[in-house]
Amino acid sequence: MNVKRIFGTILTILGIIGLIYTGIVIIQREGNAINLTVIGAISLIFFLTGISLVRNTKDEA
């Protein structure tokens, strides 16, 4: 497996975890709005970057 694909997978998983965390905290109405915005934005960046790395990396045998 390619290093870029592994890194993309890790970024995608971290992004999903961050987005789920942000959603849970928003539903429970806890936490500071600025902190949630920063965590949500970083998680979204991680998620989109990871998906992009996995999608655009070609498998070479």
Image (cartoon, grey):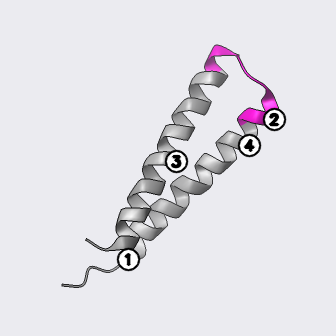
Badge 3 or badge 2: first in the primary sequence: 3
Which residue is label 4 attached to? 38
What distance separates the C-alpha of mark 1 from that of mark 3? 19 Å
Identify which amino acid the numbered label 2 is placed on: Ile
- The image shows residue 31 at horizontal and vertical percentages of 73, 22
Predominant secondary structure, magenta span: helix
What kind of element bears circle 2? helix
Res 35 quadrant in image: top right
Q: Which mark is residue 15?
A: 3
Neighbourhood count class around disc 3 (C-alpha, 10 Å): few under 14, some 14–19, many 20 upward: many
Which residue is label 1 attached to? 57
Identify which amino acid the numbered label 4 is placed on: Val
Q: Is residue 59 shown above or below 16?
A: below
Q: Is residue 35 shown above or below 7?
A: above
What distance separates the C-alpha of mark 3 from that of mark 4? 13 Å
Kindly indicate whether the residue at mark 4 contacts the one at mark 2 (C-beta within 8 angstroms): yes
Neighbourhood count class around disc 2 (C-alpha, 10 Å): few under 14, some 14–19, many 20 upward: few
Neighbourhood count class around disc 1 (C-alpha, 10 Å): few under 14, some 14–19, many 20 upward: few
Q: Which range is magenta?
A: 27-36
Q: Is residue 39 shown above or below 28?
A: below
Badge 4 or badge 1: first in the primary sequence: 4
What kind of element bears circle 4? helix
Which residue is label 2 attached to? 34
What distance separates the C-alpha of mark 2 from that of mark 1? 34 Å
Res 19 quadrant in image: top right
What distance separates the C-alpha of mark 2 from that of mark 4? 6 Å
Q: Within the magenta stretch, is there residue 11?
A: no
What kind of element bears circle 3? helix
Task: Judge left or right: residue 2 versus residue 61.
Answer: right
What distance separates the C-alpha of mark 4 from that of mark 1? 28 Å
- The image shows residue 25 at horizontal and vertical percentages of 63, 23
Badge 1 or badge 3: first in the primary sequence: 3
